[in-house]
Amino acid sequence: MAQTKQDRPIVRDADDISALVNAGPQAGSHARMVVALALGGVFLDAYDLTTLSWGISDVQAHFGLSAFQTGLVAAALNAGTIVGSLVGGWLTDRIGRYAVFMADMVCFVIAALVAGFAPSASILIMARFAMGFGVGMDLPVAMAFLSEFSKLEGRGSKAAHAAAWCPTWYAASSACFVIVFILSYVLPVAHPDWLWRASLAFGAVPALVIILVRGRYMSESPVWIARRGDLERAADILRRSYGVNPVVCPARGQKPAVVHTDPWRLVRQPLLRRGLIIASMTLISSMSYNIIIFGLPTLLVSIVHANAAQVVVISIILNLVVAFPGGLLGVRLARSFRSRPIILAGYILQVVGIGTLALIGVPHGTVGVIAALGGFAAFLFAQGFGPGCQLMVYPTLSYPTELRGLGIGVARLISGIGGTLILLFFPWMNTHLGPAMFWLVLLAPLAGVMIAFFSRWDVFGYDPDMDPALRQQFVPARRNTGAAAPELLFSTDTRN
């Protein structure tokens, strides 16, 4: 990428746009606000998932639900993510990031209000499904924004911003429990349904805030626009949002290359290998995480014999004091260290945490209670710096721009399937197995250890848009920028 006499970068093709983004935004640009708004969407995702984790028993009592019906209420949001992830991922690549982002914000507002005022369990289930649809749409587009408005290396890198979804998630979970704690002292005890209704409806507030401020800061992804062949518009976005003032000067006699979205490339090499590894780790992690985080209040009551106030306080402490710092550590590690050893260490610590819970069962005495809480804490801290961060970093940095949304969407679809199955059967497992179910949950991080150990795929410092092998597949005529090839997927491979 050349420079003019006025030290303005010259843009000849989409590679030059990617190179400018990878170099980092200028001081005073809107790029940080774009990242903040994208993380605001992630905040909403986590808040909506957490809202009923503590109040599901009140919902069951209010509507007189059976264990299976309660499981339907609990699993509705995750079921919605299955559909929303696929649709949202496809639309993110097809029509652009901005339109999908604003559509899912509107979905959040409507679904939250309907859920908060639901007159029946059926309406609540449908509203929670709609919330899940919004969550499914949001994560692919939010991760695409985080990647395509971030530099490649160092502080504020693509990996660090993608990993930031995890502490944001835990901050939202903590905020949800704090709101519940405050509302429990404000709302009348005679109306226990007001508490879960108010917390559900409150989810519309941050979505409205994002909608109101979007016009000043949000714009379409310049990388996505450039790879659609519109270099002028991509350069204009860089001027307004990234603080860079490029000069568009395509090669004489050549039109900018247009990259068309072809979903079937996800099932061709090398993307297929990457997708299988990501899907495997995502599935097992979603199953263990959902049963721990969603079932935490119920498990605290049945295992530790905590009362309602203690459940809320312990949940806040575990999220804010344990999981949130773990997520912050994960962000720091993601920008400085390779991804594979981090996720492997996270799975190993999760084995220790869940293994402790399985061995203790129902704790007896203070030592047993402390050990059980330590097991929960170990799992959540490990989730924070390990799988929680890296399982969003991996899909975000494994796929090129034209398939990034769909690739992330498929990963979240797999996560939604795992979470839905677990939440659907969690009431039954808790009733019939009790603490013995931790022996089943233990299989998930053990499988994660095996996959992370034998896999060789690592995304640290890797930009798929600048990978020569992928460029030859998607746009054979594009210029070679000399990007390094990614690391081997498995030790027997000769290429990724």
Image: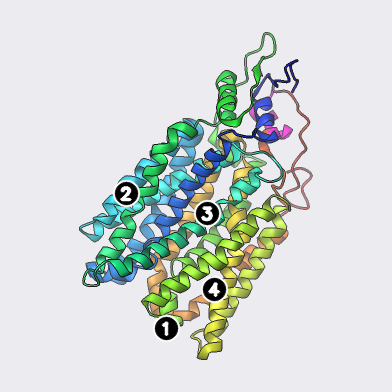
Q: Residues within 10 Å of mark 1 (few under 14, many from 20)?
A: some
Which of the two residues, 205 or 443, is positioned nearer the viewer here? Answer: 205
**CB under 8 Å between discs 4 and 2:** no
Rendered image: mark on residue 111: 2
Residue situated in front as seen by the camera: 135 or 457: 135
Instruction: State the residue position of label 3.
Output: 168
Give amino acid for label 2.
Ala
Pointer 4 local density, CA inside 10 Å: few below 14, some 14–19, many at least 20:
many
**The N terminus appears in which quarter of the rendering?**
top right
| Residue 376 numbered mark, or none | 4
Which percent across, then down, holds residue 18?
A: 66, 30
Q: Which residue is mark 1?
A: 305
Mark positioned earlier in the residue sequence (4 or 3): 3
Q: CA distance from mark 4 to mark 2?
A: 31 Å
Marks 2 and 1 sit apart, C-alpha to C-alpha, by: 34 Å
Mark 3, secondary structure of its residue: helix
Q: Position of residue 476 (x, y in %)?
A: 68, 24
